[in-house]
């Protein structure tokens, strides 16, 4: 197994690191601190950040179909319980509920919007797509039940989702990467964590005759996943469509686009960028 890394968010090209997972995390965490603000955070992440997967790829290009397996879960902990005051307290909480091997470090926005972190959990054997996504769902649900999280970042459930390597910001104190040693998480335990499938209601509705409408075709394309390089154009097209057909509640429409962004865009657009795309779409349609 290897660690594959992509620099920034403007290219799908990846390279295979000379180092293992732990060494990659520690080396990134040893870099000088970067002053991060609400205004520059998305730009820094897009241009200076490094994004990775640990596993096996058949081609050095960030596409889900190029990933054979993954040997470590990567969970974004954005919805940390408000009762957890800071990153050190979060570390204590994680140590109390997860006894195996894991790596925990703050994300670039930690301190700007409360406590935010990333949890990397090595697996005892490589996981395929079904196993990985079930484990990611199951471990996140467990952390919610334990009161560590109040909600899930569902982008972490996607097999093809890259994780950001550590970036030290001005709020970081002490060792950036916190490590717990223990038994590796069993990949085969995924069977206990499978996400329940929603009952299909397709049988309740007749299939539309005459082919797909433009809106249906657009949504199908998005539901298949939007990779880096197509995100802005796809979001602009979707926003234009909903504004043009007359959706009046613009705040709720923006929340809906955020949901689409977090579930089907890889990696999701930053919220500031999403708002800019949304406002551009409104201007084009309404002016």
Image (cartoon, rainbow, N blue to C red):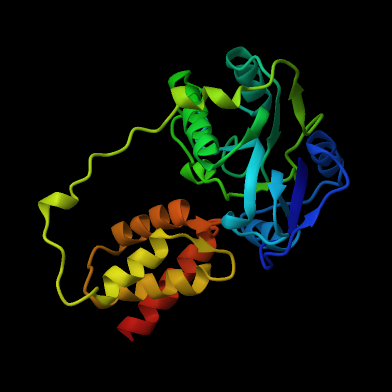
> Is 113 in front, or is 23?
23
Q: Quadrant of the C terminus?
A: bottom left
> Is 217 in front, or is 10?
217
83 to 158, vertically: above or below: above
Side of 272 where 40 appears, left or right: right
| Residue 28 screen position, x and y as percent | 82, 44
Q: Residue at point 81% right, 30% down?
A: 175
| Residue 134 screen position, x and y as percent | 48, 33
182 to 202, vertically: above or below: above
95 to 122, vertically: above or below: above
> Is 215 in front, or is 187?
187
| Residue 190 screen position, x and y as percent | 50, 27
Q: Residue at point 12% right, 56% down?
A: 205
Q: Residue at point 75% right, 43% down?
A: 166
Taking the image as drawn, is residue 168 in sight? no
Q: In which quarter of the image is the N terminus?
A: top right
Extreme-bottom residue of the structure: 287
Taking the image as drawn, is residue 268 in sight? yes
Side of 235 where 244 appears, left or right: left
Side of 159 where 120 appears, left or right: right
């Amino acid at each position: 197994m290897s660690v594959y890394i992509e620099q920034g968010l403007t290219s799908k090209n990846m390279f295979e690191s000379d180092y293992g997972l732990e060494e990659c995390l520690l080396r990134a965490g040893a870099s000088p601190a970067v002053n991060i603000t609400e205004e520059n955070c998305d730009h820094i992440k897009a241009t200076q950040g490094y994004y990775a997967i640990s596993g096996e790829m058949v081609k050095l290009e960030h596409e889900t179909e190029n990933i054979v397996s993954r040997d470590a879960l990567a969970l974004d902990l954005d919805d940390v319980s408000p009762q957890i005051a800071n990153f050190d307290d979060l570390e204590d909480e994680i140590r109390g509920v997860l006894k195996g091997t894991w790596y925990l470090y703050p994300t670039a926005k930690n301190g700007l919007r409360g406590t935010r972190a990333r949890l990397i959990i090595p697996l005892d054997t490589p996981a395929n797509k079904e196993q990985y996504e079930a484990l990611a769902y199951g471990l996140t649900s467990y952390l919610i039940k334990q009161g560590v999280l109040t909600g899930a970042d569902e982008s972490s459930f996607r097999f093809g989702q890259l994780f950001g390597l550590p970036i030290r910001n001005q709020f970081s104190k002490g060792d950036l990467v916190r490590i717990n040693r223990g038994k590796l998480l069993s990949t085969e335990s995924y069977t206990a964590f499978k996400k329940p499938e929603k009952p299909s209601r397709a049988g309740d509705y007749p299939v539309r005759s005459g082919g797909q409408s433009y809106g249906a075709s657009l949504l199908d394309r998005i539901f298949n996943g939007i990779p880096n390089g197509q995100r802005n154009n796809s979001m602009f097209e979707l926003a234009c469509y909903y504004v043009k057909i007359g959706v009046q509640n613009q705040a709720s429409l923006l929340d809906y686009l955020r949901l689409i962004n977090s579930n089907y865009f890889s990696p999701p657009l930053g919220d500031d960028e999403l708002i800019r795309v949304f406002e551009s779409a409104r201007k084009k349609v309404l002016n």
